[in-house]
Amino acid sequence: DIQMTQSPSSLSASVGDRVTITCRASQGITNDLAWYQHQPGKAPRRLIFRASNLQSGVPSRFSGRGSETEFTLIISSLQPDDFAIYFCLQHYTFPPTFGGGTKVEIK
Amino acid sequence: EVRLVQSGAEVKKPGESLKISCLGSGYNFPIYWIGWVRQMPGKGMEWMGVIYVGDSDTRYSPSFQGQVTISADKSISTAYLQWSSLKASDTGIYYCVRQVGATTGAVDFWGQGTLVSVSS
């Protein structure tokens, strides 16, 4: 299975901060990676697909970059509703595998 | 609007059987794959397996082969995950997801999760 290493596992940030989260794949996965936001009690929501494509309805402060083995999710200006857990998912090979998640907390 | 609505939380004893469900709406349910994902307490997510609803073609991750059964009933737009004999280590949150196109397709929608607690 492809291993997805996500960092950091948690971070504290303030409203307005720029936040960067990284996922590294143990082998190349082209751009078969998505980013999700998970708020307590809710279904996870896809933010980015194919590494850099913004899901319809998702604010433009979210963006994704990368290919093959290194990927980044950027929140350009953190908003109160953005405090949540973020995780990546590769679907290049079966079974799909997940990053360990990043908990974004209020500083 | 695409929705995946899962059945409610379950509290079970070791050795009991269980079947949880995932009801899809807002799209043509049979032409998509439905996957199941486990999240154990305090841990990351794990892919369990996936079913193509149209013909019930099912694929399991090696770790879950023989441990669970995934099925679907396209006539009622519902997918299922079942255990014949639960263990305490099956405790966790289980999510259904919609996967597009193939077993390596993108995952676009998630259910809200079903909490399964197994304890004597």
Image: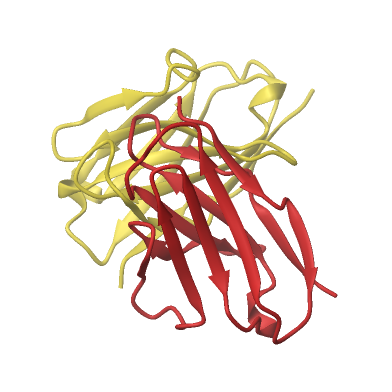
Q: Answer with the quarter of the image where residue A15 lies.
A: bottom right
Q: Is residue B74 above or below residue B58?
A: below
Left or right of residue A27, residue A83 in this image: right
Q: Is residue A76 above or below residue B80?
A: below
Q: Quadrant of the C terminus of chain B?
A: top right
Left or right of residue B1, residue A67 in this image: right
Q: Residue at x 21, y 63 (%)?
A: B27
Q: Which chain is yellow?
A: B
Front residue (pair A96, B87): A96
Residue A7 % position (x, y): 67, 50
Q: Residue at x 17, y 47 (%)?
A: B30
Q: Is residue A39 above or below residue B43?
A: below
Left or right of residue A59, residue B26 in this image: left
Q: How is the image coloured?
A: by chain
Q: Quadrant of the N terminus of chain B?
A: bottom left
Q: Residue at x 29, y 62 (%)?
A: B25
Residue B57 % position (x, y): 20, 28
Front residue (pair B9, B43): B43
Residue B118 % position (x, y): 70, 29
Instruction: Pick out the residue farthest to the right.
Output: A107
Q: Residue at x 78, y 80 (%)?
A: A14
Let me know if residue B110 appears in the view: no
Instruction: Pick out the residue farthest to the top.
Output: B66
Q: Answer with the quarter of the image where residue B12 lies.
A: top right
Residue B75 % position (x, y): 18, 46
Let me know if residue B21 appears in the view: yes
Q: Which chain is red?
A: A
Instruction: Give the mark count.
Output: 0
